[in-house]
Image (tube, grey):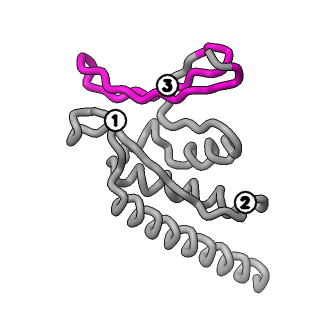
């Protein structure tokens, strides 16, 4: 067990017919999650994941990739120290791939990034309009 390393494990239980996501902490403790984040910015990412209500709402694999891209782009924009461009590598376990770990096609990642950027711009525009309305009233 490497010092200070956390691991996120995704798997599919054939008997239960259910996907599982676990975080193994540096202490060795393991917990199951619907969505989890580790590393720098993990608290902000967890907050955004909680807004998705993953315990109540099911997302398709494509929707999940879009939402993950949105969260990562948001956190990258908020990180004032980062002057590097955001590079995303995404993988998944899906029924279409017999629940084997494979990379998400680059074209799909690019489409998800474009969708996420549009969503973030719309949310920012909506927030500005709401702020203007509050100032007028």
- Residue 66 pos. (x, y %): 43, 57
Q: Which residues are magenta?
A: 3-29
Q: Which residue is mark 2?
A: 82
Q: Is residue 41 above or below residue 3?
A: below
Residue 70 vertical position relative to residue 128 in the rendered view, above or below: above
125 w.r.t. 1: above or below: below
* Image point (62%, 36%), residue name: 38
Which comes sooner in the sequence, label 1 or label 2?
2
**Mark 2 closeness class: few <14, some 14–19, many ≥20 residues within 10 Å:** few
Residue at 53% x, 59% y is: 70
**The quarter of the displayed image where residue 115 is located:** bottom left
For this view, does 118 lie left or right of residue 105? right
Q: Is residue 94 magenta?
A: no
Percent position of residue 85, x then y: 61, 64
Horizontally, residue 20 falls left or right of residue 94, namely: right
Helix, strand or loop status at disc 2: loop
Label total for image: 3
User: At x 50% / y 54%, what residue is drawn?
Assistant: 88
What is the quadrant of the C terminus in the image?
A: bottom right
Seen in the image, is 31 located left or right of residue 21?
right
Disc 3 crowd, CA 10 A, few/some/many (<14, 14-19, 20+): some
Tell me if label 1 and label 3 are in contact, CB under 8 Å: no
Q: CA distance from mark 1 to mark 3?
A: 15 Å
- What SS does tag 3 mark? strand
Residue 82 figure quarter: bottom right
Question: Does label 3 or label 2 sit earlier along the sequence?
Answer: 3
Work out whether 52 lies above or below 130. Answer: above
- Residue 22, label in figure: 3
- Asked whether 41 or 137 is in front, the reply is 41
Which of the labelled discs sits on residue 58, or is there none? none
Residue 101 — which label? 1
């Amino acid at each position: 067990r490497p010092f200070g390393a956390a691991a996120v494990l995704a798997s599919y239980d054939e008997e239960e017919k259910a996907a599982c996501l676990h975080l193994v902490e540096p202490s060795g403790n393991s917990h199951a999650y619907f969505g989890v984040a580790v590393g720098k910015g993990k608290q902000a990412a967890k907050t955004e994941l909680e807004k998705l209500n993953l315990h109540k709402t099911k997302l398709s694999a494509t929707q999940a990739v879009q939402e993950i891209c949105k969260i990562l782009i948001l956190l990258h924009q908020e990180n004032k120290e980062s002057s590097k461009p955001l590079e995303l590598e995404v993988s998944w376990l899906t029924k279409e791939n017999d629940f084997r770990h494979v990379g998400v096609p680059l074209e799909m990642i690019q489409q998800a990034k474009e969708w996420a950027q549009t969503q973030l711009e719309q949310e920012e525009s909506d927030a500005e309009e709401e702020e203007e309305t509050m100032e007028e009233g």
